[in-house]
Amino acid sequence: MLILGIDTSCDDTSASVVEDGAKIISNIVSTQDEIHKKYGGIVPELASRRHIEMILPVVDEALNKAKLRFKDISAIAVCQGPGLIGSLLVGVCFAKSISYFNKLPLVAVNHLEGHIFSSFLEDPLPEFPFIALIVSGGHTNIYRVNSFGLYKEISRTRDDAAGEAFDKVAKLLGLGYPGGPLIDALSEKGNPETIHFPRPFVDKSFDFSFSGLKTSVLNYVKKNPNAKKEDVAASFQLAIIDVIVTKTIEAAKKEHINGIVLGGGVSANKALRRRMEEIAHKEKIKVYLLPPYLCTDNAAMIAAAGFYHFKEKDFANFDLNPKAYLPL
Ligand code: KG4
Ligand code: ZN
């Protein structure tokens, strides 16, 4: 079963062909980093305009690379949300058009579900039930995944997402955009014990809150303009990782689950991966880590999750609309 996946939820235009929800045949991602870099963040209007320019060539390339045509495809899976509404609109409209024209079934996929099902594109496959930590530019959520379609949200962020905090701290340190990978690289050269930034634990809850941490980095930098950026970056990174890892492990223990899947751009972070594996190992919990290209946004994960919707005959109609806010 070959599914063509499409994701235009944020600032990457992506299309991918995946076989049986597990094997990537092609996966094309056209990033817009160059466009948004000079603004230090994503400009939604520029993002949607670029998606319009790129959607056709990206889908074409995904099919060409797979040496396939529309007639070989079983269904089109498109990301319906959450994300930037103008960006989502481009992918959804395009998917509806090619589905109509080529008489192919259409399935709608939640972007967060896609990040969870990224883990089914790599061996070893996670076993249900598992805990999924989705840490991205827009989300920091912990789910209990009982099976396909059965998700229980354990926690979410009450303000900034982890990736947002990485990007904002990188901006205030003058590092550039996107900030997460830059802080990741710079931190490897710094001492994370230099500054003790607060660990924002929200009492009696697995919820997250990162806006205070970001403000304390800002205050520190204002007071200490000559501080080594490497040390500030590494100390901030350790604080955020401490909270994420502790809460995820505690959630797994509370739910009596011994498998944790990581997804979303921030899960590409080297220090986070090391720390999660180290603590999980002590607790006899298995951690499923993905290669960085499957952590960040990609359409293979949409095709992977789309395969399960297809199997369950959960088809979308042509009145499908994108949704900026779409809880799982
Ligand atoms: O999942 P993703 O590609 O898009 C969203 O769904 O948001 O995540 C993008 C986020 C950005 O905030 C980016 O800075 C962050 O993931 N990110 C990282 C790393 N790579 C990407 N954050 C920390 N360390 C990284 N290596
Ligand atoms: Zn994402």
Image: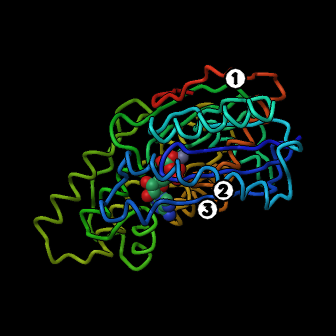
Give 49 or 327, whichever is nearer the viewer: 49
Q: Disc 2 or disc 3, which is closer to the eye?
A: 3
Q: Which residue is mark 2?
A: 289
Please identify, in this view, whether the residue under mark 3 or under mark 1 is nearer the observer: 1
Q: Amino acid at mark 1?
A: Ala
Taking 182 as reference, is 281 above or below it? above
Residue at point 54%, 40% (across, down): 90
Q: For the C terminus, give its image quadrant.
A: top right
What residue lies at 69% left-to-right and 24% top-to-bottom?
A: 150
For the residues labelled 3 and 1, the Cα–Cα distance comes to 30 Å
The answer for how far apart the CA atoms under marks 2 and 3 are is: 9 Å
Q: Nearer the viewer, residue 7 or 183?
A: 7
73 relative to 132 in the view: left or right: right
The reply to whether the C-beta atoms of the residues labelled 1 and 2 are less than 8 Å apart is: no
Residue 113: image location, x then y, percent? 63, 36
Amino acid at pointer 3: Pro
Which of marks 2 and 1 precedes in the sequence?
2
Instruction: Give yes or no for contact between labels 3 and 1 (Cβ–Cβ under 8 Å).
Output: no
Q: Which residue is mark 3?
A: 292
Looking at the image, tell me whether mark 3 or mark 1 is earlier in sequence order: 3
**Which mark is on residue 110?**
none
Residue 316 tag number = 1
Name the secondary structure under disc 1. loop
Residue 102, position as x, y percentages in the image? 80, 35
Give, as a three-letter code, the residue at label 2: Leu
Label 2 neighbourhood size at 10 Å, few (<14), some (14-19), many (20+)? many
Q: At numbered mark 3, what does the secondary structure look like: helix, strand or loop?
A: helix
